[in-house]
């Protein structure tokens, strides 16, 4: 679907069933993977906060269409029902020229997050730090 450069302090969400590859340009880079077993990630209900807090939909970035058109030896690893399966392919699985729809990977810069907090007394609910549920 496209290339996404995910920098430190950004999260990347790849929906179930989408093939992807990860290229790490600096050996000391690291990441964390979380798998959701039922449903998809979504923005939390804002309730009384209104439209100016937490994560705004406009700040989520989708990839721009991109493809690979070459042959070679590709090993594709799929996970299905908790098991890993692999096969080899002669063409890249990223050779689709374009995509259409609303099921795609996206990224979000955590610096764009607006925490709603109180400093008067007590501690607010930890959900004030929820980007996606």
Image (cartoon, rainbow, N blue to C red):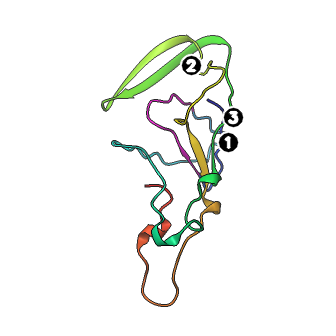
N-terminal-most mark, 3 or 1: 1
* 125 vs 4: above or below: below
Circles 1 and 2 in contact, beta carbons < 8 Å: no
Residue 112: x and y in percent read 64, 61
Which residue is more in the foreground, 18 or 22? Answer: 18
Between marks 2 and 3 in the image, the one whose residue lies nearer the viewer: 3
Element marked by disc 2: loop
Q: Mark 3 points at which residue?
A: 64
As measured in the structure, the alpha-carbon distance from the residue carrying label 2 to the one carrying label 3 is 17 Å
Report the magenta residues as a range: 11-21
N-terminal-most mark, 2 or 3: 3
Q: Residue at x 30, y 30 (%)?
A: 81
Q: Residue at x 60, y 63 (%)?
A: 113
Q: Which mark is residue 93?
A: 2
Which quadrant is the C terminus positioned in? bottom left
Q: Name the residue under label 1.
A: 5
Which residue is more in the foreground, 12 or 87? Answer: 12
Mark 1 neighbour class, 10 Å CA radius: few under 14, some 14 to 19, many 20 or more:
few
> Does residue 34 appear left or right of residue 95 in this picture?
left
Element marked by disc 1: loop
Residue 115: x and y in percent read 56, 70
Q: Residue at x 64, y 53 (%)?
A: 58
Which quadrant is the N terminus positioned in? top right
Is 17 colored magenta in this rendering?
A: yes
Residue 85: x and y in percent read 38, 22
Mark 2 neighbour class, 10 Å CA radius: few under 14, some 14 to 19, many 20 or more:
some
As measured in the structure, the alpha-carbon distance from the residue carrying label 3 to the one carrying label 1 is 11 Å
């Amino acid at each position: 679907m496209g290339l996404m450069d995910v920098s430190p302090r950004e999260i990347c969400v790849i929906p179930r069933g989408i093939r992807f590859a990860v290229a790490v340009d600096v050996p000391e880079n690291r990441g964390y993977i979380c798998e959701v077993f039922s449903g998809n990630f979504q923005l939390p209900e804002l309730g009384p906060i209104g439209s100016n807090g937490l994560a705004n939909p406009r700040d989520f970035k989708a990839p721009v269409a991109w493809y690979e058109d070459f042959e070679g030896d590709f090993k594709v690893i799929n996970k299905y029902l908790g098991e890993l399966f692999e096969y080899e392919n002669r063409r890249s699985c990223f050779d689709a020229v374009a995509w259409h729809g609303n099921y795609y990977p996206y990224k979000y810069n955590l610096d764009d997050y607006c925490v709603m907090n109180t400093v008067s007394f007590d501690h607010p609910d930890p959900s004030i730090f929820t980007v996606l549920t």
